[in-house]
Image: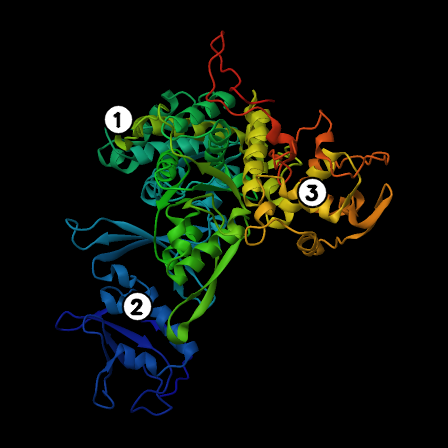
Amino acid sequence: MRSSLVKTLCVPYLENPKGARVQRLLYRCTRPGHGNGDVHPSLSINTKKDVWMCGPCNAGGTPWRLAAFLAGLDRANKAVVTAWLKEHGLLKGGARQGRNDDVPRSLAKTHDFVKAYDYVDEHGRLLYQNVRFAPKDPGKDKKTFLPRYRNDDGKWTWKALPLEQRTIYNLPDVLSAEVVFWVEGEKDASTGTSLGFVATTSGSSTSWQDRFAEYFVGRNVVVFVDADKPGRDHAVKVARGLYGKAQAIKVIEFSDAGDLTKWIERGHTKEELIELIEAVPEWKPEVIAGAELLMEVYHFVRRFVSLSEHQARVVALWIVHTHVIDSADTTPYLAVTSAEKQCGKTRLLEVMATVVANPWLTGRVTAAVLYRKTDAEHPTLLLEESDAAFGGEKEYAEAVRGILNTGHDRDGVASACVGQGAEMSYKDFSTFCPKAIAVIGKLPDTVADRSIPIRLKRAARGERIERWRRRKMRPEADALRGKIETWCSGIMGALRKAEPPLPEELSDRQQDGAESLLAIADLAGGNWPDVARTGLVQICAEARQADDSIGVRLLVDIKLVFGSKAVDKLFSAELASALAEIETSPWAEWSRGKAMTANQLARQLKKFDIGPHSVRIGDRATSGYELEDFEDAFKRYLAPNMASKVPQRPQPNASAGSGNFSKVPHSSDVGVQKREIVNTGAGCGSVGDKRPITGGGHEDADGGQAKPEGLEV
C-alpha cells in the first residue's frame, strides 16, 4: 500500500447511533481495495475500539487497525497523519497510545495525561514542555511531571534539556512586565495569569538557577511561598538570587492556604491580594560575614570527623564551593582516603551531605543511572566505596572512571551507548559536578591528579569526636546550609570575575582546582586567604611526597645530597653510596635487599637524559656527575620553588668530593651519618619545614577567632 497523501482536514465530530465517537479524515491516497482515483472522505475512526473503516463502501470488507493502517504509509505521510491525530486528541490513553508519545510507557498504566506547559524563548519559540500527569488511582499514586522536547525528527523525547538550555515559564511576558509573580509550579502561574498579572516559575522546588535573575533586572518581583519546607527553602533561594538584580522583592506566604491557587479557591479576591502585597515590607537578605561563616562550617565538620587543621579548612571551602559551582570553570575533587577501615571516610561524606548543594550520597548504582543523573541534575556526588567500584564489574568501573576523568571541567563529557538493537546509538553525557570520592588506599593516578587529598587517620585515644545523629543534627545543618546559600547568593558575581593569586608550589592541575577555593577564601577575608593557601600547599606536599614516581623521588634525593655536601661534583659510586644513606628512601634496598649501584643509578637517570661522564675531583678522575647535569631536570620535574633554589656551585677545593660526610656544614638541615634526609622537594618545596599542626583553633582574649595553632601565615 503506497500513499500519495496530499492534505488532511478536520471534519466535525459525529456521533454514531451507538454513541461511539467517530472522526472523519479527508485525504487523497491509495488504500486497500480502492483505485488511484479515490478522493472522497470515506475513512471512519472509532477511537474507542481503535477500528478504521473504509466506508461507505467498506472496500475490502475488513476493518483496519491503526497499526496496520499507518504501516502502509511512507515516512513523510505517516508523520503528517500521526501529528494530526495527536493534535485532535485521537491517540490518548492506554499503553498502546503511550508508545505514540502522549503517555510514556512507565506511566501509561497508572497515570493520565493532563496538560503540557510550554516553555519558550524570548521570541516565543518552543524549547520544551513540562507535562502534568494525574494518577488513575489517587490513593496509590501521586501527580507527577515529566519534561519533554522535540528531537531532530520532530518526535518527543521524554527527558529534560541540559541545565544551561532551560528557561522560565512565560518568558516573553516577563521581559515586558514591570511587576512579576514568582510561584512554584505552572498551575500557580496560570492562576496568577488569570488574575491579570504576569506570573512565572521554573517548575519544581529544585529548578531555580541563578542565571534566571538576569530576566528580572529592574523589575518588581513578588515571590509566593509554598507552605512546606522545600517550598520555603525554594522561595528564599529565589529571593536571594534576585537580590541586587530586581528593583524590589517581596516574599509572601499565605497563613490559611498552601499556595496561591488554594488561596484563591478559598474565596479570596484579586483586590485582597493587592492589599496584601502592598502591606508586606521589602525582603532583604540576612547580612553574613564570610570569614565567620567559613569558621562555622569548619567547626561543624570537625565536631564529627578527625581532621587536621589544614584538612578541615579545605573541606569547609569545598562545601561552600558546591553552592557556587555555576561560577567555576573547573571543580576540584576531594579524594577522601585512608590506609585502613574505620577512619571516618563515610562519616565525612554523611556530614557533608547535610550542608553541600544538591547532595547525592551513593555507594553503587548502575552505570546508566550514574551517567544520566549526573548529566540531568549535576549533583554534588559523594561516592562511597570507590575502591570496590574500580576493582569490580567492568562496565560500572569504566563508567565511574569516565565520569571522574572528565568531570572536573565544565565542558567535560563521557560517551555511552544508548538505545537497543537497530536503534543503538551513542550520547555524550555531561559529567561536570562537584565530587568527593571515598576509598581505602589510592585512587587511580588520573583521578588523583584532579583531586585534593584528604587522608584520614583513626581518631587517637583521648581525641574527642562527637557522635553523629542525623535526625538530631538536621535542624542545625539546615540552618547552616541556609546561611551558606545566603552568603553565596551575594558573591556569585564577584566569583565569576575573580582571579586569585595561585601558589607556585602547586602543579598546573592543582592550581586549576584550587582557584575556585581560593577565590572563596579571598572574598571571605580575615585570615582565610593566607591559611587557605598554606593548607592547600601543605596537603598537596604531603600527598606528593607519598605518591611521587620513583624517578622524581630520585631527583629530590640527589638534589639534597649535593646540597648537604655543598659540592658541585660527585663520583658515581659516591653518589650511589650517599643515596643509600637516606633511610626514608628505597635506595639502600634497591635490588634484592642490596643498595643501588652506580650502574643501576645510571639506568634510572637515563630516562631524564642524564648520564655519567669523566669527572675530576682533586687529583682523581673517574666516572661521575656534575650539579649542572641535573639543573634542567630539577626545573622540569620538581616543584617550582625548589627548582629555583638549586645549590650554588662552590669554588673547588682539595677536600671537596672526598666522600667524608663528617664534614657536612653545621648549617645543613640534613644529616648524613645514617640520619634521615627529609624528602620535601617532590611537591611543594619548603612548606614541609613549617611547624607541625598541633590542634584546633582557640578564641583570643577579645572573644574573636584566633589564628589556629601551628599555621604560619
Tell me, for residue 255, which label it has, or none: 1
- Nearer the camera: disc 3 or disc 1: 3
Q: Secondary structure at mark 3?
A: helix
Of the pair 464 and 665, the residue shown nearer to us: 665
Residue drawn 36% across the image and 20% down it: 279
Of the pair 483 and 48, the residue shown nearer to us: 483
Task: Tell me residue 587's x, y (percent).
Answer: 61, 46
Which residue type does callout 2 highlight? Arg
Question: Circles 2 and 3: CB distance less than 8 Å?
Answer: no
Residue lying farthest to the left in this orientation: 18
Alpha-carbon span between mark 3 and mark 1: 75 Å
> Within 10 Å of the Cα at label 1, are there few (<14), some (14-19), or many (20+) other Cα atoms?
few
Which residue type does callout 1 highlight? Ser
Which residue type does callout 3 highlight? Ile
Question: Circles 3 and 1: CB distance less than 8 Å?
Answer: no
Q: Quadrant of the C terminus?
A: top right
Task: Tell me residue 326's x, y (percent).
Answer: 51, 41
- Nearer the camera: disc 2 or disc 3: 3
Quadrant location of residue 224? top left
Mark sitting earlier along the chain (2/1): 2
Tell me, for residue 317, which label it has, or none: none
Of the pair 346 and 583, the residue shown nearer to us: 583
Residue that mark 2 sits on? 99
Task: Tell me residue 227's x, y (percent).
Answer: 28, 32
Quadrant location of residue 189? top left
Q: Secondary structure at mark 1?
A: loop
Mark sitting earlier along the chain (3/1): 1
Residue drawn 41% across the image and 77% down it: 77
Residue that mark 3 sits on? 558
Up/down of 359 relative to 472, above or below: below
Mark sitting earlier along the chain (2/3): 2
